[in-house]
Image (cartoon, rainbow, N blue to C red):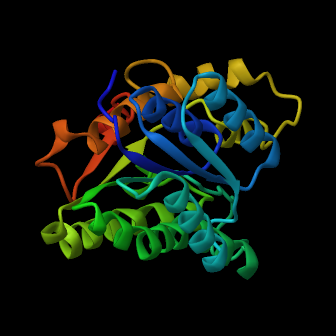
Amino acid sequence: MNDFDGKVALVTGTTGIGEATARRLAEGGAAIIALGIDAGANAMLQAELNRAGAAALVQATDVSVPDQVEKAIAAGVQEFGGLDVIVNSAAVHPYGTATTTDFETWNRAMSVNVGSIYLTARFGIPEMIKRGGGAIVNVASVQGTACQENVAAYATTKGAIHTLTRSLALDYARQGIRVNSVSPGSVRTPILERAARADDPNADIEAAFRRFGEAHPLGRIGEPEEVAELIAFLCSSKASFCTGSDYRIDGGLLAGIGVR
């Protein structure tokens, strides 16, 4: 695969979908700038990309903090010469209703899940314009369309991502920048593992994943690599007429809401 030869890609989040996307874009020839807050995950991803012979700079970054995002993007651009692709995958997933979610938790969800997309756009888009355009993909969720109970902050942020995606797409289309989002259903990630252990810290994770998968018409949960492949398509020249849209990758989950 050489669909990203000569491209520089910024990916936020170094576990789950972010990790899989960084690997997929690197396999396609992209130089990777990866930002994550988990030191262990950062080190593992850096080592994995190094072993694969990829050009990569994995940086410890809280993507909700403007100065950290600005410095990380500047370091990546200095290292690799520019920026062509942004994939926003970093997220937190708090549980709670409007009356049980404290203000700090609410603000943290907003600043990580939505604010980080604003920050990578603010500091990354000027670099993309210098290269003549590029592509941005934001990882949203089916919960931005049809949410569950007890996830008020998370679902709100994912709905906001859909709206911010459309806004960015309209604002920067004339600069050659395409912006789309993807909305996964249940996917094998650390966030889903935490969901499986929400009521029982000793829960059988694979049994829980099978149970979650039963809600999807395809009968299973998704894999991070499957989402990464869709993201790679939307970042590539093959999706050159795609912008301002959300693409579900949910095993048919929302196709049957209210029917099954």
Is 88 drawn above or below residue 171 in the view shown? Answer: above
Q: Is residue 232 visible?
A: yes
Which residue is at 36% across, 40% downward?
Answer: 231
Image position of 14 (left or right of 194): left
Looking at the picture, tell me which residue is in the foreground, 227 or 55: 55
Residue drawn 49% across the image and 60% down it: 77
Q: How many marks?
A: 0
Horizontally, residue 63 falls left or right of residue 181, namely right
Outermost residue, right side: 202
Give residue 40's position: percent from left, percent from top.
Answer: 81, 41
- Residue at 79%, 21% in the rendered image: 204
Q: Quadrant of residue 47?
A: top right
Query: In the picture, which quadrant includes the C terminus?
Result: top left
- Please provide percent x and percent y for residue 90: 58, 54
Q: Which residue is found at the position 79% from the left and 37% from the top? A: 197
Picture quarter containing residue 178?
Answer: bottom left
The answer to whether residue 110 is visible is no
Q: Is residue 78 above or below residue 21?
A: below
Image location (x, y in percent) of residue 95: 69, 58
In the rendered structure, the answer to whether residue 27 lies left or right of residue 36 reads: left
Measuring from the top left, give residue 161's x and y in whole percent. Answer: 41, 64
Depicted 189 relative to depicted 112: above or below? above
Q: Quadrant of the N terminus?
A: top left
